[in-house]
Amino acid sequence: MTRWAIFTEHRAVVGRTAEWCRQANIRFASLFILLFSLFGLVSSPRAAELAVPTGPVVFSVTGQIQVRNAGDQADFDYQLLQSLPQNEIRTGTPWTDGEHVYRGVLLSDLLARVGARGKIMRANALNDYHVDIPLQGLRHYPVLLATHQDGKKMRIRDKGPVWIILPLKDYPELNTKRHHETMVWQLRSLDIR
């Protein structure tokens, strides 16, 4: 056998071996996913259940969401909101004196938790004020659904129980009338469209 023939045969064997390994990896990965799915070890956002509120509902998300706990919506009491990752923002607002520290859940975390899929979010206040907000524009900023101001739980008279807070101090481009209109206080619900 010539060197060329040996080289060609070697390449063919290596090629068949590589193809067998690739197919074996695909089969193994498929089997792995199947087994873990059967035993509930792999979860999807849709499969992740949202607990039912045990206290008074302070806030709801409706519309194009995948995770619900009350019919066709996701209801939150203070305990459920507090169970989500909490963040703080220090900023001023046009309606408050000086800077304050606001604490709550990031809008992006809440939308991910309920599996929101829309392009527009309608924010509805207790007094029926509402504003439509394009979600794409908010994705670049840490928008907070604040439940606390300076360590104290916000009451309705304090613009609570939930207030959309934009980080105006850290992102001066948000400090405009157009963005101020999206900072809905006494937030009752978000409708994802």
Image: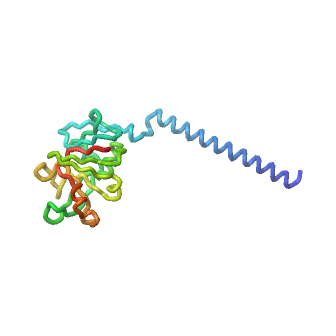
Q: How many marks?
A: 0
Q: Quadrant of residue 45?
A: top left
User: Which of the pair 89/64 is nearer the observer?
Assistant: 64
Q: Residue at x 77, y 47 (%)?
A: 12
Q: Is residue 148 left or right of residue 133?
A: left
Q: Is residue 39 above or below residue 77?
A: above
> Residue 47: x, y in percent?
39, 37
Q: Residue at x 16, y 50 (%)?
A: 160
Q: Is residue 168 left or right of residue 97?
A: right
Q: Is residue 11 above or below residue 27?
A: below
Q: Hey, which residue is sitting farthest right in the picture?
A: 1
Q: Residue at x 34, y 37 (%)?
A: 49
> Residue 22: x, y in percent?
64, 45
Q: Is residue 182 left or right of residue 66?
A: left
Q: Is residue 92 above or below residue 37?
A: below
> Residue 107: x, y in percent?
29, 51
Q: Quadrant of residue 64?
A: top left
- Which quarter of the figure is the C terminus placed in? top left
User: Which of the pair 54/141 is nearer the observer?
Assistant: 141
Q: Residue at x 36, y 43 (%)?
A: 115
Q: How is the image coloured?
A: rainbow
> Residue 110: x, y in percent?
30, 47
